[in-house]
Amino acid sequence: MKNLVLIVNTSVVQSITDQLRALDVPGFTVSHVEGHGAHTAADQFLSARDRVVGFVPRVRVDVVLPAERVDAVLDALRQPGAGLAGHGVYWVAPVEQFGQF
């Protein structure tokens, strides 16, 4: 299992969640987060408050998938029609255990 983590602008969260549902991803978690990084100064979506504070509101989407599905999901999110180009970052991490209570 792998954990696909997406950190994206708040403006594209609906697009991402729609695409994940269309890909029959069984579940995902959306969290509102703030961060600071190299792209902060160039972010056209920042308010004056966010520029002064130095933290950018973002959305984190966590998706736990079988390892063999990760590339297919990423390929779908990279498509030009997805509207995500330039709106975020991602990484993939191993999941050592996964279960339900």
Image (cartoon, rainbow, N blue to C red):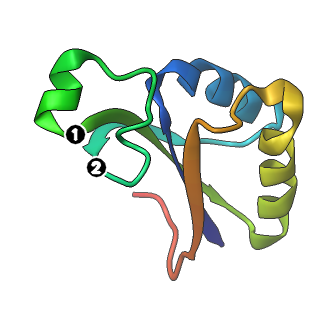
Report crowding for label 2: few under 14, some 14 to 19, many 20 or more residues within 10 A (C-alpha).
few
Residue 45 % position (x, y):
43, 20
Q: Residue at x 83, y 37 (%)?
A: 23
User: In the structure shown, which secondary structural element does the residue marked by tag 2 occupy?
Assistant: loop
Residue 5 % position (x, y):
53, 55
Q: Nearer the viewer, residue 97 or 23?
A: 23
Q: Quadrant of residue 33?
A: top left
4, above or below 86, in the image: below
Q: Dividing the image into 4 quarters, which one contains the C terminus?
A: bottom left
85, above or below 6, in the image: above
What kind of residue is marked 1?
Answer: Phe
Residue 84 % position (x, y):
69, 33
Q: Residue at x 71, y 37 (%)?
A: 85
Residue at the spot of label 1: 55
User: In the structure shown, which secondary structural element does the residue marked by tag 1 occupy?
Assistant: loop
Residue at the spot of label 2: 36
82, above or below 101, in the image: above
Q: Is residue 4 visible?
A: no
Q: Residue at x 58, y 24 (%)?
A: 12
What kind of residue is marked 2?
Answer: His
Q: Are marks 2 and 1 in contact (CB under 8 Å)?
A: yes
Q: Residue at x 21, y 17 (%)?
A: 48
Residue 58 % position (x, y):
38, 35
Q: Outermost residue, bottom direction?
A: 96
| Tally of numbered discs | 2
Left or right placement of residue 51 versus residue 38 in this view: left
Q: Which mark is residue 32?
A: none
69, above or below 76, in the image: below
